Image: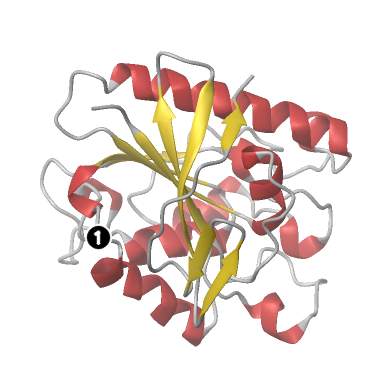
Amino acid sequence: MSSRVHLVRHAESVHNVTKDFSTLDPSLTNVGIEQARQLISNFTDASAIAVIITSPLKRAVQTTLLGFSHVLDKRNYPSDTNHGVDGGAKLIVDPDLQERSDLPCDTGSERSELERTFQGVEFSILSGNWQAKEGTYSADDAAVEARAKKVRRRLLEIADELKNENKKDIVVVTHGVFMKFLSEDSAIDLPGLARSLHSRSSSSYLQSARYMMAGEEHHLGCFSFVGRAQGLRIGQTPTQLV
């Protein structure tokens, strides 16, 4: 059985509500916190998750830690909490998953700030100026397409590493606009979207398997959108990886 890659958009963040995009790296709202926690009961394939990869922006890390506290290895949480499990899923922080724009709300915090806020999470992959929106992380389409391509290749590599493991699924927690580039599907344009893709590591494709979203159910072609980080339906659109 091959790996499945679940694309999850972060839960509701402060700037999603206030429309004030001048706040640096905003956190989740109280509603967003509850939305993320709903993943614990609504993500039905949690037992198959081997790896979770998240954007380093606070709202994505929060969504990851809250929504997958029953799946992630306990090393990703402070020792005085009951979150996480022994031998749980591996957590990878990947700056290539950050949002497209160079607005303050889509600009990350310094590594030292993230380490203070999320004790237990490994942020050593972040360079000293990882949050600078230039070069690899600039906001122009060519740069964003290039890092989306890098992520797709990385997902194939991880899927290949998991091919002989009992748990094979990968969760990617990212952002609405970058998700369009990653999936090469510009039709993804609903709030609180999570999308799940089926990965065949022996080929150069991720085949779309399902979508998840928040609130009421919405239909788009052969896909269903069901609540923020909830629900599942099967789709059939192949997405080129390279």
Q: Is residue 169 left or right of residue 118?
A: left
Identify the image quadrant of the C terminus. top right
Residue farthest along the front direction in this orientation: 222
Which picture quadrant has residue 16?
A: bottom right
Q: Is residue 119 above or below residue 240?
A: below
Question: Where does residue 99 sit, x and y in percent of width and height?
Answer: 70, 51
Q: Residue furthest left?
A: 86
Out of 205 and 28, give the one closest to the viewer. 205
Residue sitting nearer the eye, 53 or 223: 223
Q: Quadrant of the N terminus?
A: top left
The residue indicated by pointer 1 is 44
Across and down, in percent, residue 56 comes to: 55, 49
Q: Residue at x 62, y 55 (%)?
A: 175
Mark 1 belongs to which amino acid?
Answer: Thr
Residue 207 x, y percent position in the rendering: 49, 34
Q: Is residue 120 visible?
A: yes
Q: Position of residue 113 (x, y in %)?
A: 56, 56
**Residue found 59% across the figure and 55% down from its top:** 57
What color scheme is it?
secondary structure
Residue 9 shows in the view? no
| For residue 200, above or below residue 36 | above
Q: Residue at x 72, y 54 (%)?
A: 177
